[in-house]
Image (cartoon, rainbow, N blue to C red):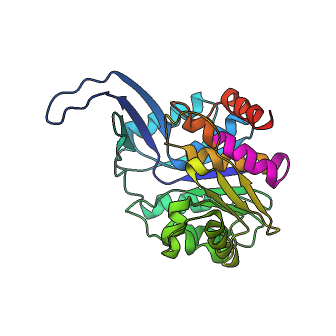
């Protein structure tokens, strides 16, 4: 079974205004609502790919109830913990001449609720996949990923960590099955400039030396590079299409990689992951099965 953890789920309110005038009343020309958070995004795209997952995490207030209902209506299995106070956040994604995001802070996570998550995680067993994705809410210490991996380190669970900076570097000692920084995050972690595929490969292999089993580097318009557990290098060129939406593209790539690995092998995992990331980037929302299939067919044409 695949489990995803989203510490700070959100309602993403996407507003399209072609010409924003600061200091004036602006009326939306188009708008959409999505239930998101990086782990939830992974679960949604896995559902499109026919992979069942359980979305874990925390919700609060009326916005949390809306998130839970929205996911349930979409056929996503959830086991979300309801916090005693606050409201799950609303993130505003303004689509205009420049894409602007205003992300809410979200509710505080109390110790009792956090222990409730730990108890749920203790039910995981050998062969399960646990996806830890995104930043840590201000109410939690930044070693929370480490605490979870340490607690489950002897159970044969495959950890997937989609994070950056110290948050990622500090969990490498637990030998995560997959890490997926993008090119800029990889450069920041090592304090270097990455000017070629050879540079990216060099520092991706450094992450492997530090403990990661598979290292997937997304490179936006330059495609993606994978160093797999057998130290083999795989490269996938970027797909052709008009980028409409950057929100959730990386999460979609993670979902595609997991599904491709479970179905076949690492080469196919990279191919499917790239198609899923592209399908999200080329559409208003997260990747759909139809769009993913179309991009997979384009890759093999």
Q: Looking at the picture, how far across and down is residue 250, in whole percent?
A: 57, 49
Reply above or below: 117 against 48: below
Reply above or below: 196 against 238: below
Specify start and end residues of the magenta stretch as a single range: 262-276
The quarter of the picture where residue 198 lies is bottom right
Q: Looking at the picture, how far across and down is residue 195, in whole percent?
A: 55, 65
Q: Residue at x 22, y 27 (%)?
A: 26
Q: Looking at the picture, how far across and down is residue 266, in whole percent?
A: 80, 55
Residue nearest the viewer, comparing 76 with 202 = 202
Q: Main secondary structure of the magenta part?
A: helix
The quarter of the picture where residue 186 lies is bottom right
Reply above or below: 300 against 188: above
- Spot the residue most to the left: 23
Residue nearest the viewer, comparing 105 with 270 = 270
- Spot the residue most to the top: 29
Q: Quadrant of the C terminus?
A: top right
Reply above or below: 169 against 272: below
Q: Residue at x 68, y 58 (%)?
A: 225
Residue nearest the viewer, comparing 176 with 253 = 253
* Magenta span includes 275: yes
- Spot the residue most to the right: 264
Residue nearest the viewer, comparing 212 with 129 = 212
* Magenta span includes 238: no
Q: Looking at the picture, how far across and down is residue 55, in whole percent?
A: 60, 46
């Amino acid at each position: 079974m695949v489990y995803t953890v989203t510490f700070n789920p959100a309602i993403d309110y996407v507003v399209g205004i072609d010409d924003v005038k600061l200091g004036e009343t602006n009326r939306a020309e188009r708008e959409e609502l999505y239930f998101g958070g990086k782990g939830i995004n992974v679960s949604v795209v896995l559902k499109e790919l026919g992979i069942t997952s359980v979305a874990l995490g925390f919700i609060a207030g009326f916005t949390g109830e809306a998130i839970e209902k929205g996911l349930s209506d979409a056929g996503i299995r959830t086991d979300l913990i309801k916090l005693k106070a606050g409201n799950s956040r609303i993130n505003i994604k303004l689509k205009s001449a420049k894409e602007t995001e205003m992300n809410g802070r979200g509710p505080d996570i109390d110790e009792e609720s956090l222990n409730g998550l730990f108890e749920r995680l203790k039910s995981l067993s050998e062969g399960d996949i646990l996806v830890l994705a995104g930043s840590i809410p201000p109410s939690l210490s930044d070693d929370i990923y480490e605490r979870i991996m340490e607690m489950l380190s002897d159970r044969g669970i495959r950890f997937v960590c989609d994070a950056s900076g110290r948050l990622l570097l500090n969990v490498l000692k637990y030998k995560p099955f997959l890490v997926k920084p993008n090119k800029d995050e990889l450069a920041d972690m090592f304090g270097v400039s990455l000017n070629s595929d050879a540079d990216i490969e060099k520092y991706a292999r450094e992450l492997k030396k530090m403990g990661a089993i598979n290292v997937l580097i997304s490179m936006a318009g330059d495609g993606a590079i994978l160093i797999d557990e057998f130290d083999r290098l795989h490269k996938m060129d970027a797909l052709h299409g008009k980028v409409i939406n950057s929100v959730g593209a990386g999460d979609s790539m993670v979902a595609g990689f997991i599904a491709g690995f479970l179905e076949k092998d690492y080469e196919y995992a990279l191919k499917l992951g790239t198609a899923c990331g592209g399908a999200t980037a080329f559409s208003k929302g997260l990747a759909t099965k139809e769009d993913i299939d179309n991009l997979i067919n384009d890759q093999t044409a």
